[in-house]
Amino acid sequence: MTEPRLMLLDSASLYFRAFFGVPDDRPDDAPGPATNAVRGFLDFIATLVREHHPTHLIACWDNDWRPQFRVDAIPSYKTHRVADGSVEEEEVPDALTPQVPIIVDALAALGITRLGADGYEADDAIGTLVARHKGTMPIDVVTGDRDLFQLVDDAAHVRVLYTARGGVRNADVVDEAFLMEKYGVANGEQYADMAVLRGDTSDGLPGVAGVGEKTAAKLITAYGSLTALREAIDGGDPAIKGAQRRNLEAGSAYLDVGPLVVRVAHDAPVPDESGELPTEIADLAGMSRLASEYGLTSPINRVIDALGLG
C-alpha cells in the first residue's frame, strides 16, 4: 500500500513562474489568449506527481492577495504590487490574467482539488491545511516563496519544495538541516521570528533598522524566540546594548504587529476536503473542450499519464 503523502501547491507562485519561464510561442496573429502559464502549470503538476508520488494534492488559492487584517497591521503590506495606484488589484501581466480562469477550469476538469478561503492568501490556506493534516501523513509544500519556510517541521514530516532557484524539477528540499545551514535557525518557528526582525522589502515589511538577516538569526538563536528576545530587551539584558538596543527599542511598535503579517494563519476557513488524487477524469467533455480550444492536449495528457488516469 502506498504511504499517504499530501502535496500543497502555492498556485500563484507556480503559475507566475510558468508565465515567465515558458515561452509564448504562438504566432502574433493567433486567436485567443496566450497559454504559456497554463501549459507550464500543468507540466509542473505532472512533474511533481511523477517525482514525489503524493496520494493527496491540493492547489491552494489566493482568494485575497492582500488580506485586510494584514493591511490593518502594516499599511505598507504589498503596496508596491498594486496596479494603477489602486490597493484593490494586484498588478498582473496582461497576458497572464486571462490564463488564470483556464487553469481553474483545467483543475476542475481533471478533478484536482483547489482550495482557498475568502479574506486569506494561499499561504494561509497552506498553513491551515498543514495544521489540519500534519501528524497524519508527510506534507510537501511547493512554493517559490521563502515565507512558507516557517512551516518546516521535521518531527511532523513537513518540508518545503522551494522552486525559486532550481525550478520544479530541481527544487531545493527545505527541512530543518537546510534552515540551519542556510539561515542559522533551527526550525520553521525560528525562521518566522527571524523573518519578522529582518523584514522583507518585497512585501513592504520594514523590519527593524540595522538588523539584517544574519543579525536577526543570531538574536533568535541566542534567545530562542522573538518573544524571549523582547522580554530580554524589556528586562534590560546587558548583552543587548548600544545601537542594537536602540534600534530594537525603536522598532517595538513594528514588532508588536510584524508577526501578524509574517505568520501564516493556521485556522482560516478552508473547506474540509481531503484532496485525494482523482481516480478518473472529473469532466471529460470539459477537458476535451479545453484541449481543443486552447491547444492543451499535450500538457493535459502528461497530467493524465502522471495521475494514472489514461
Image: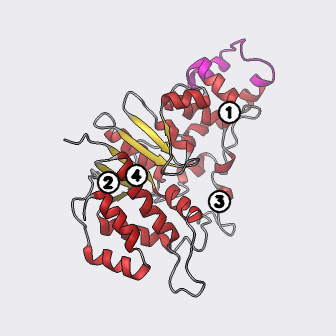
Prevailing secondary structure class for the magenta stretch in the rendered image = helix
Kind of residue indicated by mark 3: Arg
Q: Residue 271, which numbered label?
A: 2
Q: Residue 81, which numbered label?
A: 3
Between 126 and 38, which is closer to the camera in this rendering?
38
* Left or right for 59, reference 188: left
Callout 3: helix, strand or loop? Answer: helix
Q: CA distance from mark 1 to mark 3?
A: 23 Å
Location of the N terminus (image quadrant): top left
Q: Residue 213, which numbered label?
A: 1
Q: CA distance from mark 2 to mark 1?
A: 36 Å
Mark 4 — residue? Answer: 48
Provide the residue span drawn in magenta.
221-245
Where is 233 relative to 84, above or below?
A: above
* Left or right for 56, reference 280: right
Callout 4: helix, strand or loop? Answer: helix
Q: CA distance from mark 4 to mark 2?
A: 24 Å
Residue at the outermost left position: 1
Q: Are marks 1 and 3 in contact (CB under 8 Å)?
A: no
